[in-house]
Amino acid sequence: MATLPPETMRDLLSPYVSPSQLTDPLLEQLSTYLDLLLRWNARINLTAIRRPEEIVQRHFGESLFTATQLAHRLAEEAELLDYGSGAGFPGLPIQILLPRLRVTLAESQARKVAFLRETVRVLALKTEVWPRRVEEMAPSRRFDAVTLRAVDRMTLSLEAATDRVRDGGWLAALVGRDGQIPGAEEFAVPGSMHRRLWIGQNVPRGTFAAKTL
């Protein structure tokens, strides 16, 4: 039995994404993802958030909100890198909502890599898992969008993430209230007084001032 019934998940996610996008197949995939996350989180530290309802709002909802803001900026089969993916946020919910995107989850911690690979397998996603640091990718590898959220050393990570954005591509970062990316567009995250989503195109290096969530 699913941890949360579909209607509960629909209600929790409704501030973050339009009702028409909260289809039964999408909710089923997110429900499976939630169940996997809770089971693995009992053994390894994937997230400090324990309540299923809060996981749905903070992790799934904010990731889906990011997806909706990127959707009209990217081609359907664009390439997206989730930098420091952790338990898969925001990259996996973005992949679930926008299945034609070519998403790569970059995560260097072995236990989290194992979780990501199992989730991708169970959900039958085409997502790639990069099991090393982003800096170990070929220097020429670039993406149409790079996302990051709650990574260590956020300012340094933003600098490194910018190196992976193609010309004309997008950087999307979920940061704390005091974080900012000059020249990028700011979005208030639904349901939060503190978190912001910044999306910028051709963001220059050396312009960041960001705090983690």
Image (spheres, rainbow, N blue to C red):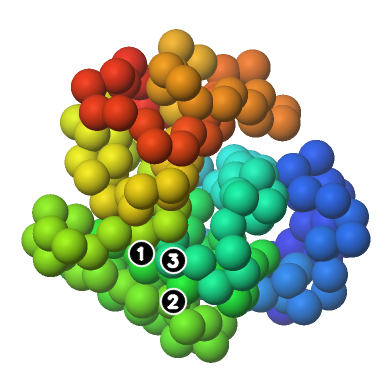
Q: Earlier in the sequence, mark 3 or mark 1?
A: 3
Closer to us: mark 3 or mark 1? 3
Q: Residues within 10 Å of mark 1 (few under 14, many from 20)?
A: many
Q: Earlier in the sequence, mark 3 or mark 2?
A: 3
Residue under pointer 2: 127
Q: Residue at x 45, y 28 (%)?
A: 175
Question: Label 3 neighbourhood size at 10 Å, few (<14), some (14-19), many (20+)?
Answer: many
CA gap between label 2 and label 1 equals 7 Å
For mark 2, give the secondary structure.
loop
Viewer-closest of 35 and 28: 28
Question: Please, what is the three-letter code of the amino acid marked with disc 3?
Answer: Glu
What SS does tag 3 mark? Answer: strand
The residue wearing badge 1 is 105
Circle 2/circle 1 CB separation < 8 Å: yes
Residue to which mark 3 is pinned:
79
Residue name at image x 23 percent, y 34 percent: 159
Numbered label attached to residue 90: none
Left or right of 14: which side holds 147? left
Does the image show residue 201? yes
Please state the horizontal and vertical placement of residue 191, each as a whole percent of the image: 72, 28
Give percent across and percent down for residue 149: 41, 40
Q: Which amino acid lies under the numbered mark 2 shown in the image of this protein? A: Thr
Disc 2 crowd rating (10 Å Cα; few below 14, some 14-19, many 20+) is: many
